[in-house]
Image (cartoon, helix red, strand yellow):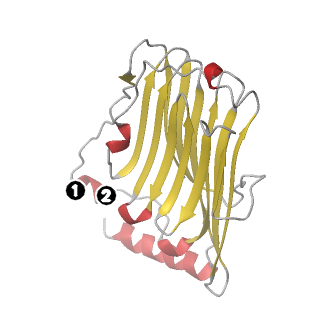
Amino acid sequence: MLCSVSTNAVASESSARDIDTAPVKVQMVDDDVLSTQTGKYAGATMISGFVLNVISQWQLPNGVTALAQGTLGAVQNAAGQVHSTVSTLASVSGGNSGNAANAGANPNAQATGGQNISVNGVSQITQVAGDRNTGTNSALIDFNNNAVTLTGAATAPSAVASNSTGSIKAGISFGSNGVSVALQTPAGLATQTITPGNGQIAQLLQIAGNNQQVANALQLHLQTQQMSAAMIRQLGVLQALQNSRR
């Protein structure tokens, strides 16, 4: 099972504008139709753990790369105890990070307002003002017991980095209120926010410059435990009883 949401924007504009995505289409289905449907789903008892990877990266035209990434993993042992791990990494590297003049920023361009939008569920917002920019928001949820975690990170709940002048910043934090990722550059802002209490996952790109390459990515890998022979037999009997009533 796999669920993926992704938005991609390639913009060449001289003024600020929002990149509209295609609307989500919903088809209403009556209860009498749903009652005849069969299929499989993952019950709460099947989930034995998860691996959450988040990464934000910004490449500026002067060769500087700002990066913030992290991994949160949780696994349940045979006794029902949960063991969790967290690792983070933030860096600003390459090029001439102290030379803001070659950062591709456009002081006359503005990309604002997206940070004030609140959506239940997953929201992906891309605002671009400038030329030859590329921005991508992607979110993936799947079942994978062999999920690959991000490498190079330290075992810590947060990490921050910046250039010598403070004009480029990268940060990530795992806390009791959720996950927060933010990149700040002279040409804009990239953020990812996960708030479990409100059930919200928000990805935001605001690019006010030229020749910028920006990406937000989130991967949630759910891990499942093997069903026992007794559970398989019970499900088989239940399905047989349900089919006999039709």
Instruction: Look at label 1 and name its amino acid.
Output: Asp
Mark 1: few/some/many CA within 10 Å (<14, 14-19, 20+): few
Q: Residue at x 58, y 31 (%)?
A: 214
Mark 1 touches mark 2? (CB < 8 Å): yes
* Up/down of 127 relative to 246, above or below: above
Position of residue 32 in the picture relative to residue 119 (left or right)? left
Q: Residue at x 69, y 22 (%)?
A: 62
- 157, 219: nearer the viewer: 157
Q: CA distance from mark 1 to mark 2?
A: 7 Å
- Helix, strand or loop under label 1: helix
* Up/down of 52 relative to 129, above or below: below
Q: Which residue is identified by label 1?
A: 32
- Helix, strand or loop under label 2: loop
Q: Can residue 56 be seen in the rendering of this structure?
A: no
Check the image and name the residue furthest to the bottom.
79
* Up/down of 231 relative to 216, above or below: below
Mark 2: few/some/many CA within 10 Å (<14, 14-19, 20+): few
Instruction: Look at label 2 and name its amino acid.
Output: Thr
Q: Which residue is identified by label 2?
A: 36
> Residue 84, position in %: x, y?
65, 72
* Up/down of 41 relative to 77, above or below: above
- 94, 139: nearer the viewer: 94
Q: Can residue 212 be seen in the rendering of this structure?
A: yes
Position of residue 179 in the picture relative to residue 76 (left or right)? left
> Residue 161, position in %: x, y?
67, 48
> Residue 53, position in %: x, y?
62, 53
- 211, 233: nearer the viewer: 211
Check the image and name the residue furthest to the front.
165
Residue 215, quarter of picture: top right
Q: Residue at x 39, y 15 (%)?
A: 15
- 153, 49: nearer the viewer: 153
> Residue 61, position in %: x, y?
66, 21
